[in-house]
């Protein structure tokens, strides 16, 4: 073996030895289902949807199903973020979620040791016609949000990579903390429901005319949602850990600008890479939190990927029927629910699933079920053929 290869191998081993575990220490979810994580868990375990039918010509000439924050919720959010100067509604939502998570901590995070990572796909998209307004820049919003939270010592980062953004942001945060560059990361996923977003998905004929049904034979599209979700990650021992993120990976289908792979092989590659990093075989995974959009091709692709990786009997769920597809918030929101599932030792049911509608066997969870949950696989897929995976574990 060449000397350079020996050095590289030794460096990898040393890195593995000093790599600290990355723990989730606080969370929040803000959506139509509630303004905190607990209310979301209770709603989902009770089978309550945040998705409902709307008739509102400000968004669409036709009725549509979606999950939107109501007037009372927005008033409360605005009241709690009033001290922050001139925040847009998108920024208010992100700041509110992060503050709710930060308030759970007994110890204050040091700004110089903490990075803010914003996951979003649209940001202030409603300002797009005002080309001279720098608020349309996601980087600008990230700065505003970070400053409003009091974390302005470290430049915030933006992850905007279609619907895998939230999972990628969590994995990116894990890597930064493992490297030792920072001790803490505030990962915020946020997207609002807007006419622009709704009309875009309507043009793809991807919107279901009723409540969505992930993995069901009668599924016909997504319901959109708006939400903010926050997970605070840390390598410090000062905080009570809720769960830990131990691995992650990404891949690309290189198939189509919006249509996913037909074989699932590429998502399968990202799953296998995450399993290899975590030093786990498929049989150790106790639950899969799927992307599960309820579109024909996404659900088929995910099902094939799970089958290729040996997950035919592993419990699988999608939460899109409760919250709608919250785009850049989805990966963070669903990861927070994974953390709750680990804490409560209970599988998450998939609402709307009745008749199996994908070409391979899957063990879709349909009711809240007690279970020993030590390792959970989180997956996401998005436009451009993007795929991302993360593995969460019990502490």
Image (cartoon, rainbow, N blue to C red):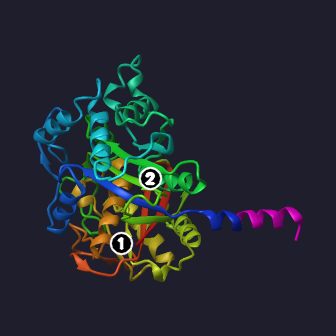
Number of dots carrying numbers: 2
Q: Look at the picture and state if 395 lies above or below 66.
A: below
Mark 2 in CB contact with mark 1 (< 8 angstroms): no
Q: What stretch is highlighted in magenta?
A: 1-12
Q: Which residue lies furthest to the top in this view?
A: 132
Graded by Cα atoms within 10 Å as few (under 14), some (14 to 19) or many (20 or more), the crowding at tag 1 reads: some
Asked whether, in this view, residue 118 is left or right of residue 4, the answer is left
Give the label on residue 66, or none. Answer: none
Residue with the mark numbered 1: 358
Give the label on residue 164, or none. Answer: 2
Task: Measuring from the top left, give residue 121's x and y in whole percent.
Answer: 40, 41
Q: In which quarter of the image is the N terminus?
A: bottom right
Q: Look at the picture and state if 362 lies above or below 70.
A: below
Which marked residue is nearer to the observer: mark 2 or mark 1?
2
Query: Whole-Å distance between the Cαs marked 2 and 1?
Result: 22 Å
Q: Which residue lies furthest to the right in this view?
A: 2
Q: Look at the picture and state if 88 lies above or below 354.
A: above
């Amino acid at each position: 073996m060449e000397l350079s290869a020996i050095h590289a191998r030794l460096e990898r081993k040393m890195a593995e030895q000093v790599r600290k575990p990355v723990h989730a220490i606080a969370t929040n979810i803000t959506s139509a289902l509630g303004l905190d994580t607990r209310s979301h868990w209770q709603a989902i375990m009770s089978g309550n949807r945040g998705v409902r039918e709307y008739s509102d010509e400000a968004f669409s000439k036709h009725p549509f199903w979606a999950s939107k924050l109501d007037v009372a919720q927005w008033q409360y959010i605005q009241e709690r973020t009033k001290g922050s100067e001139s925040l847009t509604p998108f920024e208010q939502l992100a700041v509110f979620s992060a503050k709710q998570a930060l308030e759970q901590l007994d110890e204050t995070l040091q700004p110089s040791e903490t990075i803010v990572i914003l996951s979003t796909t649209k940001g202030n998209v409603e300002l797009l016609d005002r080309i001279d307004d720098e608020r349309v820049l996601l980087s600008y919003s990230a700065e505003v949000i970070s400053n409003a939270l009091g974390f302005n010592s470290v430049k915030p980062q933006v992850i905007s990579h279609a619907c895998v953004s939230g999972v990628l942001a969590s994995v990116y945060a894990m890597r930064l903390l493992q490297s030792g560059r920072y001790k803490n990361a505030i990962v915020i996923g946020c997207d609002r429901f807007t006419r622009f977003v709704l009309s875009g998905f309507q043009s793809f004929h991807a919107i279901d005319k009723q409540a969505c049904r992930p993995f069901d034979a009668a599924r016909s599209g997504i319901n959109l949602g708006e939400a903010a979700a926050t997970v605070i990650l840390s390598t410090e021992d000062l905080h009570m850990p809720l769960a830990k993120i131990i691995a992650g990976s990404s891949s690309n289908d290189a198939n189509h600008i919006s249509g996913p792979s037909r074989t699932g092989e590429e998502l399968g590659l990202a799953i296998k890479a995450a399993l290899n990093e975590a030093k786990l075989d498929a049989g150790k995974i106790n639950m899969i939190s799927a992307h599960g959009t309820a579109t024909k091709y996404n659900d088929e692709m995910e099902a094939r990927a799970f089958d290729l990786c040996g997950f035919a009997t592993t419990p699988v769920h999608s939460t899109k029927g409760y919250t709608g597809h919250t785009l850049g918030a989805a990966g963070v929101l669903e990861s927070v629910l994974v953390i709750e599932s680990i804490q409560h030792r209970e599988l998450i049911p998939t609402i709307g699933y009745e008749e199996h509608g994908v070409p391979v066997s899957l063990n879709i969870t349909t009711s809240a079920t007690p279970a020993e949950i030590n390792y959970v696989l989180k997956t996401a897929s998005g436009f451009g053929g993007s795929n991302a995976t993360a593995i969460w574990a019990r502490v």
